[in-house]
Amino acid sequence: MSKILIFGDICPTNDTIQSFESGSGERLMGNVLPLIKDADYCIANLECVITDHPTPVKKCGPILYGSTKCMTTIADVGIQAVSLANNHIRDCGDEGVQSTIVTCNHYHIETFGAGVNEEMAALPLIVEVRGKKIGFVSFAEREFNYTKSGQMGAKALDLFEDYDRIHELRKKVDCMIVLFHGGIENYRYPSPLLMKKCHKFVDSGADVVLVQHSHCVGAYEQYKGSTILYGQGNSIFGYRRGNEAWNESLLVSVEVEDKVSVKFTALETQSDGTVCLSHNPEVTMHPFMERSAMVTDIQFIETEWQKFCNSIEPLYLSMLYGHGLQINRLNRLLKNNLVRLLYSKWQLNVTNNLVRCDAHREVLETLLNKYNY
């Protein structure tokens, strides 16, 4: 039997940078290390750029990077490969992508999901573990991160090509694992569209689908004999006081023998930002199982999604119209009344039509891409 361990998002933060640069896996992960040593192969999502010469790009949202020293500790932990398909891999432009890949290779940590061009970013990782071939692919949604037209970056999911690639790769491996960096942050259920994408991953041959990026533990689904996890949570992303969703995660164990089985282990972030096995796993696992019981109820999923979208309407509409941080905050405080004052229902309806129609949206993306940094 071969055993694969998969961590979620890993990124050095102010409270963990010394641990990341210490070279000591024990300091960073403590009592989680025996689980890694017991596994045959271990991977994670590296949610930052690795460089000693950061050149931050202009974008909305945080810029995430760590020094090359951080990789000494990740290597000491026992992580053997990292997915780079995420929304931060281009936070320092081409130099950052190149530096991350070169540094990982220097520490004999394999990378997948990003590259110097789209062809390289699309390459799968195939490893043989105890006589079983395990295939890994990873994709990200399109933000400021993806490779295109000679630009280095992450492999963005292409709905017209990548499912076929998974189907072909599945013929060459005993187990197919897909990492998808997508969905909405801080939401514990899948959106209706995210469910369709993940179901299609399985229909194309995936045995395991892990959705990362949400920064919280979500729910899982057994679909046609395969496992889909909608939200793995942060593995190491710093500690946030009063935000328990941020401070918990799942370690995923995939065992491959005659069939593929998946197990979840609850982790928690300590006040110094380091990670350990959860002291009270039921605090994470019981709500996780309750949410998972509701995932197959499509009406419930659609209702919860509508509720969530309603709750973030003041932020999203303000961002859509290009408002700055202060206006965004003011609109949230005013419960979207600022946007209602500035834009009529007719104007909002026109915007809706431009966004929802594939043809109009393609025109908008083509025009707005001129302003990408």
Image (cartoon, rainbow, N blue to C red):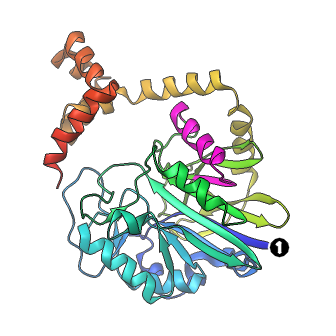
Question: Which quadrant of the figure has residue 207?
Answer: bottom right
Q: Residue drawn at (34%, 25%), measured in percent from left and top?
A: 356
Amino acid residing under circle 1:
Met
Task: Specify the segment rendered in magenta.
Answer: 191-210
Quarter of the picture holding the N terminus:
bottom right
Q: Nearer the viewer, residue 254 or 342?
A: 254
Q: Residue at x 62, y 52 (%)?
A: 209
- The percent coordinates of residue 88 (x first, y second) are 35, 60
Residue 187: image x %, image y %? Answer: 52, 39
Q: Residue 229, how many percent across, how many down?
A: 64, 49
Which residue carries the number 1 mark? 1
Question: Could you tell me which secondary element the residue under label 1 belongs to?
Answer: loop
Instruction: Identify the residue at horizontal 62%, vertical 66% (top origin).
Output: 135
Q: Indicate yes or no whether the magenta region holds residue 265.
A: no
Q: Is residue 242 visible?
A: no
Judged by its main secondary structure, the magenta piece is helix
Q: Is residue 353 left or right of residue 307?
A: left
Residue 160: image quadrant is: top left
Q: Identify which residue, 356 or 219, lies in the foreground.
A: 356
The local crowd at label 1, few if under 14, some if 14 to 19, many if 20 or more residues have their Cα within 10 Å, is: few
